[in-house]
Amino acid sequence: MDWKVLMQSEQMKQLVVDALEDLKGVDIVALDVRNKTSFTDFMVIASGRSDRQVKSLAQNVVTKARERGLVPLGVEGEREGEWVVVDLGEVVAHVFIPEKRDFYNLEKLWGDEAPAAARADRQ
């Protein structure tokens, strides 16, 4: 395991969590998905109380990342503001309105309680 990369992804995860907490993100969860997928190390999931807050939360993640010299690989869903994804490589942030978060339930899909068969399919 490359500890330097791990520390960077841990620090990046904390930067995302802090950015979401700064603007009062709701139910922030960080999932370690290193053993489940190769495209990212962590998924950080949060909710906003409205589409406007979801957009602001995602934008704050982008702003804080850029302040640290990180350039997002992509940002999707900003126009609608129901589910915004900020891809920072080692960390992917998902910011939802509550209804969309409940519908997609990423915590169940990617969390520790994901069915073993589903985890095996993603490896």
Image (cartoon, helix red, strand yellow):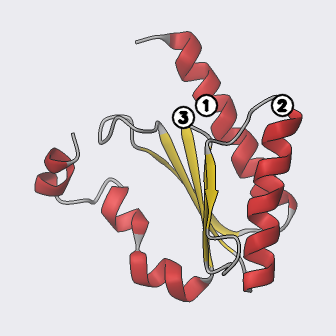
Residue appearing at x 32%, y 63% in the figure: 109
Q: Amino acid at mark 1?
A: Glu
Asked if residue 69 can be seen in this view, the reply is: yes
Asked if residue 49 can be seen in this view, the reply is: no
* Residue 84 quadrant: bottom right
- Residue 86 percent coordinates (x, y): 63, 54
Q: Is residue 30 left or right of residue 121?
A: right
Residue appearing at x 61%, y 21% in the figure: 7
Residue appearing at x 78%, y 40% in the figure: 65
C-alpha span from label 1 to label 2: 14 Å
Q: Could you say whether the residue bearing mark 1 is in a helix, strand or loop?
A: helix
Note whether 40 is above or below 4 in the view shown: below
Q: Amino acid at mark 3?
A: Glu
Which sits in the foreground, 46 or 63?
63
| Label 2 Cα crowd, 10 Å radius (few <14 / some 14-19 / many 20+) | few
Q: Check disc 3 and report the residue beneath it.
A: 90
- Identify the image quadrant of the N terminus: top left
Q: Check disc 2 and report the residue beneath it.
A: 68
Q: Could you say whether the residue bearing mark 2 is in a helix, strand or loop?
A: loop
Which sits in the foreground, 78 or 30?
78
- Residue 90 percent coordinates (x, y): 54, 34
- Residue 11 percent coordinates (x, y): 68, 30
Q: Check disc 1 and report the residue beneath it.
A: 10
The reply to whether discs 2 and 3 touch (Cβ–Cβ < 8 Å) is no
Note whether 39 is above or below 100 in the view shown: above
Indicate which disc, 1 or 3, sits on the residue closer to the N terminus: 1
Indicate which disc, 2 or 3, sits on the residue closer to the N terminus: 2
Indicate which disc, 1 or 2, sits on the residue closer to the N terminus: 1
Q: Amino acid at mark 2?
A: Arg
Note whether 8 is above or below 73 in the view shown: above
